[in-house]
Image (cartoon, grey):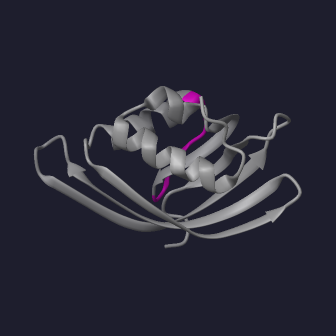
């Protein structure tokens, strides 16, 4: 497994994981007690609900594009802002197109890798 030694590498791994449908690799990017805001007003606060939120994106069977806009890092914490878009097909067969700006907080782990503490897909909207 590729080590995520920068916050940007974590975000690249999210794109690969969503686009290839690799839910297990996506889950390794989150701390045990991380939270994930997959929709405005919805907050996943445990690994089971984060897994389901990520599964919903994978089920679109689409393509995620993401561009890191800014990384603010101090010590073992980083705030990362991105712009992303995702296009796919909803469960009803209709096209789904989403775009947003996200804000994420990542923490450097003792092995030098980075993981999400807070993942807010709609974080700057």
Name which residue lies at 48% across and 32% down.
Answer: 51
Q: Is residue 94 above or below residue 71?
A: above
Magenta stretch: includes residue 42: yes
Residue 104 at x, y percent in the picture: 63, 58
Q: Is residue 118 above or below residue 97?
A: above
Tell me the quadrant of the picture where the N terminus can be found: top right
Name which residue lies at 43% across and 33% down.
Answer: 52
Q: Quadrant of residue 57?
A: top left
Name, please, the residue furthest toward the right: 75
Would residue 29 appear left or right of 37 to someone viewing this image?
Answer: right
Name which residue lies at 45% across and 49% down.
Answer: 15
Magenta stretch: includes residue 57: no
Name, please, the residue furthest toward the front: 2
Name which residue lies at 52% across and 30% down.
Answer: 25
Residue 95 at x, y percent in the picture: 15, 55
Residue 21 at x, y percent in the picture: 36, 34
Q: Which residues are magenta?
A: 40-47
């Amino acid at each position: 497994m590729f080590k995520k030694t920068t916050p940007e590498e974590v975000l690249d791994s999210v794109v690969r994981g969503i686009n290839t449908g690799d839910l297990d690799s996506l889950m390794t990017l989150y701390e045990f007690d991380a939270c994930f805001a997959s929709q405005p007003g919805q907050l996943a606060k445990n690994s089971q609900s984060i897994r389901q939120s990520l599964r919903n994106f994978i089920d679109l069977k689409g393509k995620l594009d993401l561009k890191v806009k800014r990384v603010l890092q101090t010590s073992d914490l980083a705030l990362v802002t991105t712009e992303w878009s995702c296009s796919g097909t909803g469960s009803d067969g209709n096209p789904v197109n989403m775009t947003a700006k996200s804000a994420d907080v990542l923490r450097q782990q003792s092995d030098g890798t980075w993981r999400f503490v807070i993942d807010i897909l709609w974080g700057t909207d």
